[in-house]
């Protein structure tokens, strides 16, 4: 199968995540102030500033090594829950394509496998699943939609567009949930009526993965 997503695409996603988090930092922090401790946007900003300061050194490596470096930076620099969970996502993302050369891109099949591995590690590390008012409520339905659309023959951008929509619906579903994981757990019913900050940030992150894909 031919390469559908170039190495440049994977670099661009990281380049676009850096200004995105600065733009959205306050919003994610506001969401976290309502049901957590008000640092979600700050946490991600600390991590991606570290990524920004090293990206030029890492760009020349293959997709797996680049994303592993991003994940490591998030793991090392960010405290709290979301930093390590985001970190694990990026660490795992490139594993299925770790044998590629520095200029090689990936096929659609490989991309779906990468998302699968990256999203699966969050349930493992977080000991969590859907319905607990976490980022899983965005990521797991998004992954299901991506896999289903890919299996049905959609091109990768169309499939990822469906994943983004499913992720947004999942995010919206967190509004009426009581949290059974993370800091919002302590609020019980008082968390109802608020979106989960990690579900919100991951929904927007997936949208960047989508928007940066070239049209089929
Ligand atoms: P902290 O909760 O340590 O302050 P952040 O504010 O950066 O960290 O991130 C909070 C987000 O992390 C939550 O909104 C939720 O989406 C996610 N989260 C917390 N615990 C878990 C978990 N066990 N599994 C999945 N996601 C989690
Ligand atoms: Mg927090």
Image (cartoon, grey):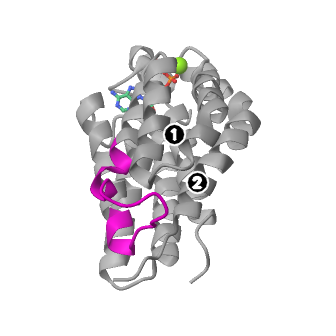
- Whether residue 85 sits left or right of residue 59 in the image: it is left
* Magenta segment includes 102: yes
The answer to which of marks 1 and 2 sits earlier in the sequence is 2
Residue 11, labelled with which disc? Answer: 2
Residue 84 is situated, as x and y percent measured from the top left of the image, at 41, 26
User: What residue is rendered at 49% in x and 63% in y?
Assistant: 103
Q: Which residue is mark 1?
A: 175
Ligand 1 - quadrant of the structure image: top left
Work out whether residue 99 or residue 159 is closer to the camera in this orientation and state it.
99
Residue 82 seen by the camera: no
78 relative to 60, above or below: above
Q: In the picture, residue 109 is in which quadrant?
A: bottom left
- CA–CA distance in space, label 1 to label 2: 33 Å
Is label 1 in a helix, a strand or a loop?
Answer: helix
- Whether residue 12 sits left or right of residue 134 in the image: it is right
User: What residue is rendered at 38% in x and 64% in y?
Assistant: 111
User: What residue is rendered at 33% in x and 66% in y?
Assistant: 110
Mark 1 or mark 2, whichever is nearer to me: 2
Residue 154 is situated, as x and y percent measured from the top left of the image, at 42, 83
Tell me the quarter of the image containing the C terminus.
Answer: bottom right
Residue 164 seen by the camera: yes
**Which contiguous range is marked in magenta?**
92-112
């Amino acid at each position: 199968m031919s390469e559908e997503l170039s190495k440049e695409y994977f670099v661009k996603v990281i380049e676009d995540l850096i200004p995105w988090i600065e733009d959205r930092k306050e919003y994610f922090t506001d969401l976290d102030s309502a049901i957590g401790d008000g640092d979600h946007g700050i946490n991600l900003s600390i991590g991606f500033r570290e990524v920004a300061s090293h990206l030029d050194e890492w760009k020349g490596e293959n997709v797996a090594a680049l994303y592993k470096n991003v994940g490591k930076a998030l793991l090392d620099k960010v405290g709290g829950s979301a930093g390590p969970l985001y970190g694990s996502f990026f660490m795992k993302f490139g594993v299925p394509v770790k044998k590629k050369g520095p200029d090689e891109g990936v096929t659609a099949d490989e991309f779906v496998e990468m998302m699968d591995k990256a999203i699966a590690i969050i349930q493992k590390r977080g000991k969590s699943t859907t319905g607990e008012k976490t980022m899983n409520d965005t990521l797991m339905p998004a992954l299901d939609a991506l896999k289903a659309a890919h299996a049905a023959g959609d091109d990768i951008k169309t499939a990822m567009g469906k994943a983004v929509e499913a992720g947004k619906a999942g995010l919206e579903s967190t509004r009426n949930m009581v949290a059974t994981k993370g800091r919002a757990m302590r609020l019980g019913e008082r968390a109802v009526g608020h979106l989960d900050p990690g579900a919100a940030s991951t929904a927007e992150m997936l949208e960047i993965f989508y928007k940066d894909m070239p049209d089929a």
